[in-house]
Amino acid sequence: MSSSRRHHPIARITHWVSAIALTVMAASGMRIFNAAPFFARKGDAPFAWWPWEGTPIPAVLTLGGWLGGARHWHFAMMWLLVANALVYLVHLFRHGRWRTIVPRVNAWRDAIEMARFYLYVRKDHPVQGKHNALQQYAYTSMLLIGAVMVTSGVAIWKPVSLSWLTNLYGGYALARWWHFAAMLALGLLVLVHVIMVFTVDPYALRAMTTGGYDEDRWSPEARNARPLSNLLPRSKKP
């Protein structure tokens, strides 16, 4: 019997706290953006890196009701997210679990083989550990993008007292764009993550709530699973 606790309680708690905090931050952030739905400074030409300059985001996707309310939600979730991230990072490094997240130097070869499997070029699921190489690249990217979100957010929050940080992002207007772009990039990665969970490894939901996971029956490697293929558990051996 290979059923075990796949995720530590700290990893499970911080995962769901992050999910809630990021959702609230994204919705309130879009409401803040709607107060000035453009990135170019007044008098400048339209911002070339954003084709929808001046177009507000549909109100149904936003939270806060008005600029002040949205800012309250946004900053409350910001502090929660930063504290939560610190707890998670300490957990990763204290217990050495960062090795399951950070890809190895030559992990790109494993990532290519994983992509070939998903594209039906390769027949058998590549051998993997807790996370495959594509997941490792995605999760590491999420952490790096999160760092950009936090630092660019602080840069536009305190553009005078932290002018050195704002200048690192190219000034206030560009810092706003980097903050918004990081949110979009993280949102895209989260969307892909959710899709892959439901179409490849739905048993990961149980692992991320109760922690229980039967590697021999449920893991994608054991089931030779790819999107919408071999979703049922592997049969128990007699």
Image (cartoon, rainbow, N blue to C red):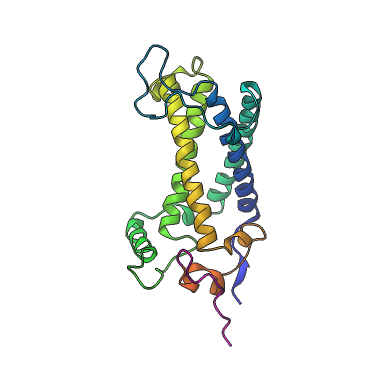
Q: Is residue 91 left or right of residue 220?
A: right
State which region is magenta. Answer: 226-238
> Which residue is rendered at x = 50% and y = 53% of the image?
193
**What residue is rendered at 60% in x and 38% in y?**
81
Is residue 97 visible in this depiction of the protein? Answer: no
Report the magenta stretch's main SS: loop
Asked whether 184 or 56 is in front, the reply is 56
Q: Identify the image quadrant of residue 60.
A: top right
Image quarter for residue 67?
top right
Percent position of residue 58, x then y: 55, 32
Q: Dividing the picture into quarters, in which one does residue 72 lie? A: top right
| Left or right of 91 in this view: 116 | left
In percent of width and height, residue 11 lies at 60, 52
| Residue 92 position in % (x across, y down) | 54, 50
Total tally of numbered discs in the picture: 0
Image quadrant where one finds the N terminus: bottom right
Question: In percent of the image, x 58 and y 28: which residue is there?
Answer: 31
Q: Is residue 137 above or below residue 53?
A: below
User: Closest to the observer: 157 or 195?
Assistant: 195
Q: Residue furthest top?
A: 43
- In this orientation, does residue 93 appear? yes
- Nearest to the observer: residue 169 or residue 205: 205
Q: Is residue 1 left or right of residue 219?
A: right
